[in-house]
Image: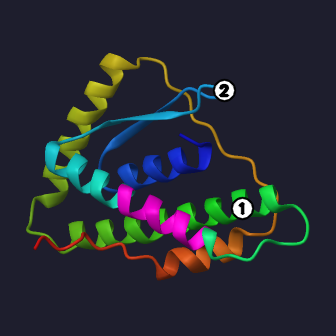
Amino acid sequence: MGEEKARLVYLVAEALRCRPVLIGKGDGGQRVHVFGFAADLERADLLATSLLLQMASGLARVPAPPEGVRAYRRSWMLGFTDEVYRLLSAAESKAAATGTPGTALVLADRRAEVEQAVAEVYPKIRRSVPRMSGDGYRDGVSAARRADLARPAVR
């Protein structure tokens, strides 16, 4: 999986109360190992799949810049991904705040269980921050604001 696609999957999972771990880099690509409760994992999977398609479709409609196509496309995808994460995190925080009393305590307990499962499999994890060049970031943010973040209806 490409670095930008893996980042989208990672951040969607993180926003939806899962704990993703990014694995690998270089020629073998990257994978995302996601930990969480079944309902959260299902939501993250469905939404990440939908957003990957929306990101690819949106990027395909963007006219190629005269110079720095690769850098523009990468920064566009980072902008899209970062804004999706911001919007999802805000929606999840709002939902948790308007829930029944004790919701925060239940969510904290669930997070602790998930973190324990991650620690058992990956005892040493380090964080990384993507580097960016190119001027497509703002366009990617705009595209993310138009993205459909709702769960698809079951017919």
Looking at the image, which residue is at 22% across and 66% down? 96
Which region of the structure is painted magenta?
49-59
Nearest the camera: 108 or 134? 134
- Specify the quadrant of the image occupied by residue 28: top right
Where residue 8 is drawn, which disc sits there? none
Residue type pointed to by label 1: Arg
Nearest the camera: 77 or 63? 63
Residue 122 position, x and y percent, is 40, 20
Instruction: Estimate the spatial distance between the alpha carbons at disc 1 and disc 2, rounded to whole Å.
Output: 20 Å
Q: Which residue is mark 2?
A: 27
Q: Is residue 138 magenta?
A: no
The answer to which of marks 1 and 2 sits earlier in the sequence is: 2
Whether residue 15 appears in this view of the structure is: no
Q: Dot 1, crowdedness within 10 Å: few (<14), some or many (≥20)? A: many
Q: Is residue 87 above or below residue 40?
A: below
* Colour theme: rainbow
Residue 98 position, x and y percent, is 18, 75
Helix, strand or loop: magenta stretch: helix
Looking at the image, which residue is at 45% across and 76% down? 147
**Would residue 46 be found to the left or right of residue 54 on screen?**
left
**Would residue 66 be found to the left or right of residue 26 on screen?**
right
Looking at the image, which residue is at 33% across and 72% down? 91
Task: Give the total number of marks visible in the rendering.
Answer: 2
Q: Is residue 51 magenta?
A: yes
Residue furthest out toward the right? 67
Q: Secondary structure at mark 2?
A: loop
Residue 22 position, x and y percent, is 49, 34
Q: Which residue is mark 1?
A: 73
Whether residue 52 appears in this view of the structure is: yes
**Would residue 122 be found to the left or right of residue 151 on screen?**
right
